Every structure is written in C-alpha cells, then in structure tokens.
C-alpha cells in the first residue's frame, strides 16, 4: 500500500465511524437515576438581539439584550409571555418541577 491508499483508507474509516446515528446521551435526574425528557427539537423561543454599546468609565460595554430591561415595554412583556409559555409546556419533563 502506498501513502495515498493509506490516507484514503484512513479517511474512509473515520467518515464511516462518524456517520452513524449514535444515540445522544440522555440527561439523568441525579435523585431518582431516571432519564429526563428534553426538548428534542431544540426549538427554543427566539430572542431578538439589538446591538447597544454603552460607555462606562471609558470602557465600551456591549449588551445585545439591554432592551429586555424595560419590563413596561409591551414588546418585552410579549417576550416574557412567550418564554413563560415555553417553560410551562416543557417543565413537566423536569424533575421536581411544579406548575
């Protein structure tokens, strides 16, 4: 075997080993030892980013989520409602969670 064949064989072997549908490890409740259901689709509510740069003692402070600090803003209240609904929908899957 020459070096090219060895490289090709190694590349194919690595690809084959990594392309399987291995089951992802499931989180486990440390108290009961039982697996905990998770949000498998990972479709968490989106949060808008608005770039804001403040100057504090000559240092630039970047905060893309500063807009969330104004809890009186209807846009922020809507965001909180969406986050709360998502959490309540998924919290039965969390151990020791109460709604």
Image (tube, grey):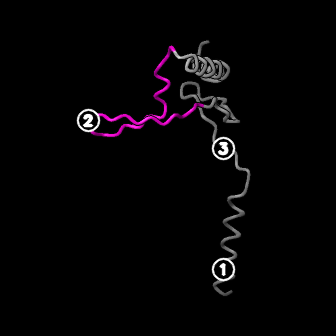
C-alpha span from label 2 to label 3: 46 Å
Give the residue displayed 61% in from the left and 17% down from the top. Answer: 81
Residue 92: percent from left, percent from top: 65, 19
Q: Can you tell which mark lies on residue 57?
A: 2
- In front: 17, or 44? 44
Q: Can you tell which mark lies on residue 24?
A: 3
Residue 28: percent from left, percent from top: 59, 32
Q: Is residue 92 above or below residue 40?
A: above
Question: Quarter of the image holding residue 42?
Answer: top right
User: Which tag, 3 or 1, sits closer to the chain's start?
Assistant: 1
C-alpha span from label 3 to label 1: 31 Å
Query: From the viewer's perspective, is 69 left or right of 84?
Result: left
Give the residue displayed 48% in from the left and 37% down from the top. Answer: 51
User: Which tag, 1 or 2, sits closer to the chain's start?
Assistant: 1
Image quadrant in which the N terminus is located = bottom right
Q: Which label sits in the foreground, 1 or 2?
A: 2
**Which contiguous range is marked in magenta?**
47-72
């Amino acid at each position: 075997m020459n070096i090219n064949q060895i490289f090709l064989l190694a590349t194919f072997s690595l690809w084959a080993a990594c392309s399987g549908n291995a089951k992802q490890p499931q989180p486990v409740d440390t108290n009961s030892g039982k697996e905990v259901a998770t949000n498998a689709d990972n479709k968490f509510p989106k949060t808008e980013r608005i770039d804001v740069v403040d100057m504090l003692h000559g240092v630039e402070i970047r905060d893309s989520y500063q807009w969330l600090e104004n809890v009186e803003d209807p846009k922020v209240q809507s965001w909180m409602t969406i986050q709360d609904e998502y959490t309540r929908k998924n919290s039965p899957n969390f151990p020791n969670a109460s709604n």
